[in-house]
Structure formats: C-alpha cells, structure tokens
Image (cartoon, grey):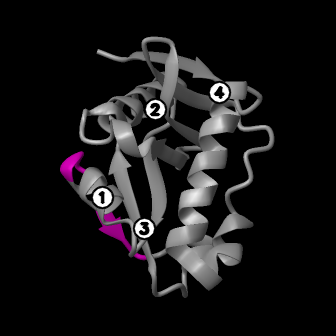
C-alpha cells in the first residue's frame, strides 16, 4: 500500500514529479509539446495528490475546477520504475473522492494519443470518451474523457 497525501501545487515533491512528467511528455510529444504545455501550468492548483512508497514520492495527480460542477484531472504521473503497481489507480481514486467530497459531480480530463497506458487507465476506471472540449476541441491527437461521480 502506498501513502497518499493531499496537498497543493506548492508541494516540493509534486514539483519534482511534475518535472519528470514534463520531461517524459516532451520526449513523447516532440514538436507538439509546446501546445500542450501551455495548458499544464501548475501555479495555484489547490488539489494535488502525491503517492509515496517508503517516504519516496513515486506518483501524483492534480485537479482544478473546470466549472461549478466539474473538476478537470491534470498532471497524472507515476515514475517509470513504479508503474504497474496500482499507484495511478490509487491517485485517481483519491482525486475522484476528493472532488466528490467538495461537491463536484463529475471529472473530465485530456490525454494524448501517445499515452496508451493513460488511455487504458481511464477506460479501466470507468471514464468514457467524450468529444474534445475547450482548447482540445480541434486537436486530433487528444482524447478527452469524463466520469460522473457518485
């Protein structure tokens, strides 16, 4: 079992994980990374979850308000050497729980077509594909998802 900590975007462990995420995304996305990076700023995100294994930060996720009923999941990441251990599922479940506790009715998110493990994670956790929203509306490489919260 991994320890999950609720925090915010000022958390130094979150910042370290986001730096690793950004490096991974730059490699995967290549020339299109600058477009996506502009929508992934972490300034002032109030809802962050960091996962720890023996006091070592190994994964994270965040969410921010999209509208008065919806939270947008952002910055989901697990260190490569810790993947396949259920960490992302635990972080995602904690974010969904937190969103529900604070009165939100659904979560949405965007991921890229090169993030096959992320697409599988969201489908496995009952997120359904929706038409691309907002800034992703005309981006062919984006997959957008939603999930109603209980």
Q: Earlier in the sequence, mark 1 or mark 4?
A: 4
Q: CA distance from mark 3 to mark 4?
A: 27 Å
**Mark 2 or mark 1: which comes first in sequence?**
2
Residue, x 51% and y 29% (percent of image)?
103
Q: Residues within 10 Å of mark 2 (few under 14, many from 20)?
A: many
Question: The residue tagged with tag 2: helix, strand or loop?
Answer: helix
Residue marked by disc 4: 13
| Residue 137, quarter of picture | bottom right
Left or right: where does residue 123 sit relative to residue 98? left
Instruction: Answer yes or no: is residue 67 visible.
Output: no
Q: Which mark is residue 149?
A: none
N-terminal of the pair, mark 3 or mark 4, is 4
Q: Quadrant of the C terminus?
A: top left
| Residue contact between numbered discs 3 and 4, judged by CB atoms under 8 Å | no
Cβ atoms under marks 2 and 1 closer than 8 Å: no
- Name the residue carrying label 3: 144
Q: CA distance from mark 3 to mark 2?
A: 17 Å
């Amino acid at each position: 079992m991994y320890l999950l900590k609720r925090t915010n975007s000022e958390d130094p462990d979150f910042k370290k994980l986001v730096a690793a995420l950004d490096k991974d995304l730059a490699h995967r996305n290549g020339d299109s990374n600058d477009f996506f990076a502009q929508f992934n700023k972490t300034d002032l995100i109030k809802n962050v979850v960091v996962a720890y294994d023996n006091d070592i930060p190994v994964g994270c996720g965040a969410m921010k308000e999209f509208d008065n009923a919806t939270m947008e999941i952002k910055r989901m990441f697990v260190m490569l050497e810790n993947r396949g251990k259920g960490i992302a599922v635990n972080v995602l479940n904690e974010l969904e729980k937190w969103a529900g506790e604070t009165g939100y009715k659904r979560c949405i998110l965007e991921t890229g077509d090169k993030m096959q493990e992320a697409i599988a994670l969201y489908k496995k956790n009952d997120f359904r594909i929706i038409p691309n929203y907002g800034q992703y509306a005309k981006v062919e490489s984006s997959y957008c998802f939603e999930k109603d919260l209980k």
